[in-house]
Image: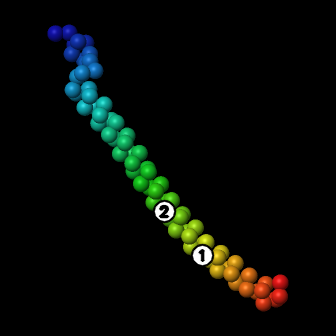
Amino acid sequence: MDCRAAEDRGELDLTKQIENLTTELKSVKDLEESHRKLNGKLQQDLAECKRDNVILSHDNATLLNRLRDAGL
C-alpha cells in the first residue's frame, strides 16, 4: 500500500473529523474562559459604578440642601 494513500484522508475520515472537532472544542473552551474572566471584571466594574452612583447621589442631595438653606 502506498504511504501517501494512507495519509491522504478524505473529509469523511472519522479520525480527521475527531481531530478537527477536538481543535474546535479547545478553541471554544478558551473563548469561554476569556468571556468568563471578562464577565467577572464587568460585574466588578458595575458594582463599583453602583457604589459611586450612591455616593454621588448623596453628595448631590447634600449640596442641594445647602443651596436651599442658603436661600438659593
Residue at horizontal 82%, vertical 89%?
70
Q: Amino acid at mark 2?
A: Gln
Is residue 51 shown left or right of residue 72?
Answer: left
Q: Nearer the viewer, mark 2 or mark 1?
A: 1
- Mark 2 and mark 1 residues within 8 Å of each other at the beta carbon: no
Q: Secondary structure at mark 2?
A: helix
Q: Is residue 20 left or right of residue 68?
A: left
Name the image quarter holding residue 45: bottom right
Q: Is residue 34 above or below residue 55?
A: above
Q: Which residue is mark 2?
A: 43
* 55 relative to 22 in the view: left or right: right
Which corner quadrant of the image does residue 67 belong to? bottom right
Q: Position of residue 42 (x, y in %)?
A: 51, 59
Quadrant location of the C terminus in the rendered image: bottom right
Mark 1 residue type: Val
In the picture as drawn, the residue positioned furthest to the left comes out as 1
- For the point 78% across and 86% down, the residue is 68
Left or right, residue 29 beside residue 69 = left
